Image (cartoon, helix red, strand yellow):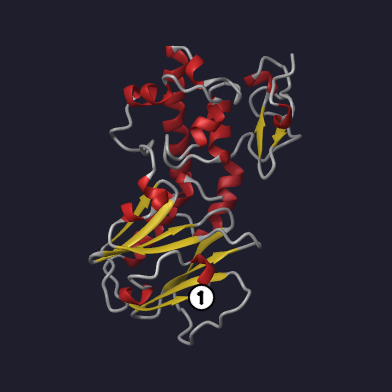
Amino acid sequence: MPELPEVEALRGFLGERVVGEVVEKVYAVGVHALKTYEPGVAVLEGRRVDEVGRFGKFLGLRAGDVWLVMHLARGGWVRWSEKVAEAPPRPGKGPLALRVRLVGGAGFDVTEAGTQKRLAVYMVRDPQEVPGIARLGPDPLAADFTPEVFAGLLAGERRQIKGVLRDQGVIAGIGNAYSDEILHAARMSPFKLAASLAPEEVARLYELIGTTLRDAVERSRGLPLRDLKAEKKSGLRVHGRKGEPCPVCGDTVREVSYRDSALQYCPTCQTGGKPLADRRMSRLLK
């Protein structure tokens, strides 16, 4: 799933190419993905794109007083083309959900792989009309995300720190992959209760949220869209690397499975050498 660094890279890539350009045609091919109907996507046609924005994991294009907002979910992606076909795409069972063609012929497709079909597209006057954006917590790369703000978010929070970091209503943009990476860098168990963190642990975790995300953004900056997913995978130290050696200590990276996801961690770096029980058992092995 694209998380904050990848969506930020998409924002930068599209911003360099579409801001100032005029939309010629918009095709909403995947009706399942369109979550709003008034205004319709055709309102973009003939308008100049003024900005490309990011809201957590949401990507948005503003043209005048309307926003095209997208959430790529698990299988979504943006594919740029210098020459988009002029013929309308055929609706069907393929991955194409939305096509935007600019005057001059360039443009992009929004696609979704797999069968779950969770990608979402909204046409709104204000991004806050999108329910997922309205509930977002602070952006961890924003100037107002201070150590004091972060400490306040964790105070009294009785959930495990992994779940807190992933909660978009607490902090916007961090998902399964980067929460694993942040906690590994912090040498912290994903099952540790957020409210139990000592002040020095909170301070270190705050610092590593910023450095982990900013480093990922920098690695992705300027890359072609087709290379962003590979860059994300190559830059991860524990997430998605079950059975591989930890790059810090050499211990074997282990996994805890959930119903529809999994986390990865290093026992030596994060849990004092003790393996975590399968999450369905809901406890740490003693």
| Image: 123 above or below 166 | below
Quarter of the image that includes the C terminus: top right
Three-letter amino acid code at disc 1? Val
| Image: 136 above or below 115 | above
In the image, is 279 to the left or to the right of 156? right
Q: How many marks?
A: 1
Q: Residue furthest left?
A: 64
Bin the neighbour count of mark 1 within 10 Å (Cα to Cα): few under 14, some 14-19, many 20 and up. many
Rendered residue at 72%/17% (across/down) = 274
In the image, is 156 to the left or to the right of 47? right
Location of residue 117 (image quadrant): bottom right
In the image, is 174 to the left or to the right of 268? left
Nearer the observer, 90 or 237: 90
Give residue 134's position: percent from left, percent from top. 35, 47
Residue at disc 1, secondary structure: loop
Nearer the observer, 209 or 153: 153
Location of residue 86 (image quadrant): bottom left
Which residue bears the numbered disc 1?
Answer: 29
Give residue 78's position: percent from left, percent from top. 49, 63
Rendered residue at 71%/16% (across/down) = 273
| Image: 110 above or below 154 | below
Rendered residue at 33%/71% (across/down) = 39
Nearer the observer, 242 or 279: 279
Nearer the observer, 271 or 281: 281
Location of residue 21 (image quadrant): bottom left
Give residue 132's position: percent from left, percent from top. 42, 49
Give residue 247's position: percent from left, percent from top. 65, 29
Rendered residue at 74%/18% (across/down) = 285
